């Protein structure tokens, strides 16, 4: 079991990353809190070593994505509409961000992680494939389709 | 556009309330699990210690039982060899009581064998062959802590090939005489024969018997028993050692007699201890 100091450091370092992944999948704060507890508890109990900070971050991303998917599969999960999340954000953020985030959330779920990991975390398709345990071709395809959908919704040019 | 997506995602942050509630949850979980992990090893430790204890007691008990001498077989021709058996009738020690016995036990390893197999192995060994002449008296003497055990072993010897094929005379002696025999440097089989002989001839000594073959001792006993020779109450000249007529066992069968020699004559307290060879 990892020390309290180590776990608190991880919460401070990766909370935003986990939060963004939760945003891509979940629709309310309670689910997000569940994922936070689940992911960081797994970290606390994980005895393995990480080769680097990047390795550790990739671990958090993979575990968070899987935790979100597992929660969504659960028949007991709380149901709420995505608009609540956006409404919560839009009260604090500029309209443009809300607009972009709404466009991202309107994408099919399978594209959202890829768009986030590529455009925010700056991962290559190969790296995304490794993190999500997916095929590189599948990632390329999701990126391409997600990008096209966003372009339709938001207009303007998109660059890799 | 790429920057817009990046900036939009960047605007999503985990607020302090979420971080704090997560840290608080983890702290509670840590305490719960610490209690669990501190009690589980103790339980496991106690369980493991109990298992080890039971195992050790079991092994110790088995070792005690399997190494505890229960019965004895003395095999005497001229080589004198003694087998000590455990309660499973397996050989735990094989000791030689003269030089010829040492030669035999060097030739055959019987420890751990069932006594019938051990008897066969010894009697049929190359080293023993030269002693099993027509005149030789292959003698088995059995002693055990109960008459039932003695009967069981006697029966086993009587039916094993080593006995049947070579014939001989066998005796049953009390296990009480074993220590006395060993103090006199004799196998208890030869010592039992000495005790019988000494009833007729008080001048005969364990030293005399040590240098006689079993066939020589048995021949003298038969002569006294048949009345062909006057018994010697002591003080006179002895009957010699080895000068008497030898009598082989014409039937070729193992003859098993019951002789309780434990309260009979005393040995002269000299002699060699057995040579443990197995």
Image (cartoon, coloured by chain):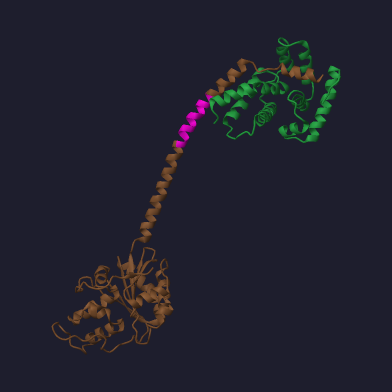
| Picture quadrant of residue B5 | top right
For the residue pair B75 and A52, the one nearer the viewer reads as A52
Which colour represents chain A? green
| Picture quadrant of residue B262 | bottom left
Q: Is residue B172 visible?
A: no
**Residue at horizontal 40 percent and vertical 73 percent from the top:** B106
> Residue at the top extreme?
A91
Q: Is residue B45 visible?
A: yes
Which colour represents chain B? brown
> Percent position (x, y) of residue B124?
43, 78
> Percent position (x, y) of residue B128?
40, 79
For the residue pair B276 and A120, the one nearer the viewer reads as A120
The quadrant of the picture occupied by the N terminus of chain B is top right
Would you place residue B62 above or below residue A45 in this image? Answer: below
Helix, strand or loop for the magenta stretch, by majority: helix
Describe residue A141's horizontal placement relative to residue A40 as left or right.
right
> Percent position (x, y) of residue B194?
24, 78
| Picture quadrant of residue B20 | top right
Would you place residue B250 above or below residue B25 in this image? Answer: below
> Residue at the left extreme?
B235
**Residue at horizontal 39 percent and vertical 83 percent from the top:** B130
Would you place residue B93 above or below residue A40 in this image? Answer: below
Is A24 contained in the magenta span? Answer: no
**Residue at horizontal 75 percent and vertical 17 percent from the top:** B7
Would you place residue A114 above or below residue B15 in this image? Answer: below
Q: How many numbered marks appear?
A: 0
Per the rendered image, the range of residues in magenta is B28-41
> Percent position (x, y) of residue A4?
54, 25
């Amino acid at each position: 079991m990892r020390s309290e100091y180590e776990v608190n450091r991880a919460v401070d370092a990766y909370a935003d990353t986990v939060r963004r992944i939760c945003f891509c999948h979940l629709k309310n704060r309670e689910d997000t809190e569940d994922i936070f507890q689940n992911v960081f508890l797994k970290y606390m109990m994980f005895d393995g070593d990480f080769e680097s900070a990047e390795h550790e971050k990739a671990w958090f991303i993979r575990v968070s994505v899987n935790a979100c998917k597992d929660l969504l599969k659960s028949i007991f999960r709380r149901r709420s509409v995505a608009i609540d999340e956006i409404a919560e954000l839009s009260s604090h953020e500029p309209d443009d961000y809300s607009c972009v985030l709404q466009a991202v959330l309107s994408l099919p779920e399978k594209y959202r992680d890829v768009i986030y990991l590529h455009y925010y975390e700056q991962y290559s398709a190969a790296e995304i494939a490794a993190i999500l345990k997916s095929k590189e071709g599948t990632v390329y395809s999701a990126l391409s389709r997600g990008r096209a959908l966003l372009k339709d919704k938001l207009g303007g040019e998109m660059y890799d | 556009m790429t920057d817009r997506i990046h900036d939009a995602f960047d605007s999503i942050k985990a607020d302090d309330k979420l971080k704090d509630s997560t840290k608080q949850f983890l702290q509670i979980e840590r305490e719960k699990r610490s209690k669990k992990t501190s009690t589980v090893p103790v339980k496991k430790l106690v369980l493991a210690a109990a298992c080890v204890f039971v195992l050790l007691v079991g092994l110790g008990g088995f070792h005690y039982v399997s190494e505890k001498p229960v019965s004895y077989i003395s095999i005497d021709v001229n080589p004198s060899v003694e087998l000590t058996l455990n309660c499973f009738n397996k050989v735990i020690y094989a000791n030689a009581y003269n030089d010829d016995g040492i030669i035999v036990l060097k030739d055959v390893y019987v420890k751990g064998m069932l006594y019938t197999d051990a008897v066969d192995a010894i009697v049929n060994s190359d080293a023993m062959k030269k002693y099993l002449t027509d005149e030789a008296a292959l003698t088995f003497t059995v002693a055990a802590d109960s008459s039932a055990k003695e009967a069981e072993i006697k029966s086993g010897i009587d039916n094993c090939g080593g006995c049947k094929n070579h014939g001989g005379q066998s005796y049953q002696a009390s296990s009480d005489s074993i220590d006395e025999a060993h103090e006199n440097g004799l196998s208890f089989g030869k010592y039992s024969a000495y005790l019988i002989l000494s009833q007729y001839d008080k001048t005969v000594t364990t030293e005399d018997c040590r240098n006689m073959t079993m066939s020589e001792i048995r021949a003298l006993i038969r002569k006294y028993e048949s009345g062909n020779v006057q018994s010697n109450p002591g003080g006179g000249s002895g009957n010699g050692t080895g000068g008497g007529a030898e009598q082989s066992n014409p039937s070729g069968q193992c003859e098993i007699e019951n002789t309780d020699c434990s309260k009979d004559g005393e040995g002269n307290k000299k002699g060699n201890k057995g040579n443990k060879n197995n």
